[in-house]
């Protein structure tokens, strides 16, 4: 392994000092920011997420803010999902596609007001995309990056901690719904959300100068529930079938290939970007689909930076886009982006750096 | 420091195995790819660039390919610089701006044919930008990422190595001009270019499966000239006044603020993105400009991930956007993005993590 070279081109999040203080040992770069990925004991961090409550610096989940009279119109033009029923205080998962129906990003859309939306994005420059579309269509909307940085509390005990800090009203928040509030004078939005399937909340800090204070409020409140630092946990997200756009997708992937068809509404207006292509793809049927892989072998062999080829009888049928040791399944598990005619229960060979490994295809999620 | 967490979301370049074999110890992430930044002895790597020849994996400099009848038209719409005289085989440095005149990227444009251009980009998703503009304006052009990855030979002896491998014709290449050719059956384009001011070439590999072979051809050929591995060297680029978009710029920076006015042609057609805003900015005068800083102190104190405030008499006047130890000037030097009325020879205070440090403002470049 090698170290990250510091430069002002890569930004820290408002929780960076907290992450350092908690003992961060590994990180990634996401939206040109430093994202902590481990504090030195991945298995302990995993079980804390599964059984307790884990505190994450996910400030890299940047917001693309749409503000102005045409904010809602731009949101709908960008998203091939019907947003007409979206209420203030509601969030929705919206895969964004280009004009060819290829996935660019899969943000959570937050409607803060009729003229104010955030797209809480994955790792790509949606500012450019949204800004270009807004300007080219002459819309009256400003696209910007506000001073907003999420911190996540994830795990079955997250609700106890968040309710202890903010009040029992948070228990009534429905999935992806949120509320703007403040704690000790720190402006935040609180959403039932997070990149795990273990339950929890994202706390959107609206004043980057107060990251350490916000971190410590939740850290201290969480002590009775054994809170500790963590990060989006690749074993858990793999078990739970959560998609990583850019990792599990390539520059040809459409939403139907990666189990996102349920978030696409083909009857949105024709001016929605990519909708015509998506209708055609749906009509013609997809060429690839996404399945799980359970690999033979009893020691952890995670994927590195390279996707690995998948073969059936010596013919390449797809690639493995992630692979992690599942502490619950006691196996290496991964995602396959694979020819649509290769079905679950097929035995395939994954061409790994050390040689081929047998694997069984299964539907996602694993757990 | 901390390690980079491997994931398929971050790609290696075709020269990644070579970089590992050469002993890479530090890297950055650039265009969601791994960019080697050091092989363990930054000072030796610096002097090799200044006095000899250094071999760089800069595969992260991705190409945004514009192909089709409207490729040239799209290039001109994207670039507020007159491209009407650009010849096949010629390259040009073209700051790209949004509709407000804010810099998005500063690629080298390569004209490969009347209907084929590459934008060899810095670190941001210009695919999205160019793709959105092309689709929204109904242009007949395909925007894609081709299998093209640059390797750089930089330093005063680079020309000897490249001429030894490819022939003396490379000595006649003018700055940013290029030629497509092949070596041992490996398709490449060779350009006089590179992110240093020490002279040299970029070799654009057009078949990603042949990175190790291409690396080794130049490595072996360069032995008589003492070739060795290196990377874009922040001390040298700082001494030479080279801009890092994203590092030295923010989401408000226009080209005039950062010494790029000479690459802007205000008389390009009105349909060029940002040109109206740039004319207005030029007419009104800029609020900030970019100068060099020579800091007091005799030990290396590079900038980390955070820009640092610059003050005059206790008033904040700008930020220091990079800082490195100059082995030739024997001082910490950096770039200031600073109020336009603060002039060279002013003494300022840089508010560093360990406390304020005095610095003198000077014009760029330093050397």
Image (cartoon, coloured by chain):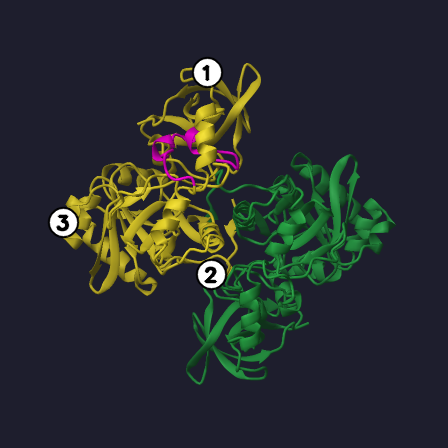
Chain colours: A green, B yellow
Report the Cα–Cα distance between label 2 and label 3.
38 Å
Q: Extreme left residue here?
A: B168
**For marks 3 and 1 on the same chain, the one whose residue lies earlier in the sequence:** 3
Position of the C terminus of chain A, as image quadrant, is bottom right
Q: Is residue B146 left or right of residue B314?
A: left
| Residue B52 percent coordinates (x, y) | 23, 41
Q: Is residue B211 above or below residue B101?
A: below
Q: Nearer the viewer, residue A243 or A70?
A: A70
Report the Cα–Cα distance between label 1 and label 2.
47 Å
Residue under the image location 24 percent in, 63 percent down: B186
- CA neighbours of label 1 inside 10 A, class few (<14), some (14 to 19), many (20+): some
Badge 2 and badge 3 both on one subunit? no
| Residue A14 percent coordinates (x, y) | 63, 40
Residue span colored magenta: B248-270
Q: Residue B13 colored magenta?
A: no
Q: Give the residue at mark 1.
A: B347
Q: Give the residue at mark 2.
A: A305
Q: Is residue A271 above or below residue B279?
A: below
Q: Secondary structure at mark 3?
A: helix
Contact between marks 3 and 1 (CB within 8 A): the answer is no
Main SS of the magenta part reads: loop
Q: Secondary structure at mark 2?
A: loop
Task: Tell me the chain of label 2.
Answer: A
Q: Is residue A209 left or right of residue B170?
A: right
Of badges 3 and 1, nearer the viewer stands 3
């Amino acid at each position: 392994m090698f170290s990250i070279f510091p430069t002002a081109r890569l930004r820290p999040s408002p929780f960076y000092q907290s992450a350092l203080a908690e003992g961060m040992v590994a990180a990634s770069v996401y939206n040109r920011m430093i994202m902590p990925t481990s504090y030195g004991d991945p298995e302990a961090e995993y079980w804390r997420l599964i059984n307790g409550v884990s505190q994450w610096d996910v400030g890299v989940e940047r917001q693309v803010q749409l503000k102005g009279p045409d904010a809602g119109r731009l949101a709908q033009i960008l998203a091939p999902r019907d947003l007409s029923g979206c209420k203030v205080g509601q969030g929705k998962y919206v895969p964004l596609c280009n004009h060819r129906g290829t996935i660019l990003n899969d943000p959570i859309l937050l409607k803060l007001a009729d003229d104010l939306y955030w797209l809480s994005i994955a790792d790509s420059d949606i500012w450019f995309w949204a800004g270009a579309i807004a300007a080219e269509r002459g819309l009256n909307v400003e696209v910007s990056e506000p001073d907003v940085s999420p911190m996540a509390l994830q795990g079955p005990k997250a609700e106890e901690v968040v309710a202890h800090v903010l009040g029992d009203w948070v228990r009534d928040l429905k999935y992806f719904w949120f509320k703007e509030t403040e704690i000790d004078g720190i402006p935040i939005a609180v959403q039932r959300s997070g990149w795990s399937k273990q339950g929890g909340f994202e706390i959107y800090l609206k004043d980057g100068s107060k990251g350490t204070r916000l971190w410590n409020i939740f850290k201290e409140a969480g002590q009775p529930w054994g809170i500790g630092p963590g990060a989006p946990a690749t074993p858990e997200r793999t078990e739970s079938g959560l998609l990583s756009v850019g990792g599990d997708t390539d520059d040809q992937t459409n939403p139907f290939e990666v189990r996102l068809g349920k978030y696409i509404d083909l009857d949105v207006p024709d001016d929605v970007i990519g909708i015509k292509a998506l209708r055609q793809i749906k009509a013609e049927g997809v060429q690839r689909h996404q399945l799980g892989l359970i690999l033979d072998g009893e020691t952890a062999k995670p994927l590195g930076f390279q996707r690995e080829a998948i073969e059936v009888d010596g013919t390449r049928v797809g690639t493995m886009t992630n692979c992690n040791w599942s502490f619950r399944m006691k196996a290496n598990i991964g995602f396959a982006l694979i020819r649509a005619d290769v079905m679950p229960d097929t035995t395939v060979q994954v061409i790994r750096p050390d040689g081929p490994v047998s694997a069984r295809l299964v539907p996602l999620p694993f757990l």
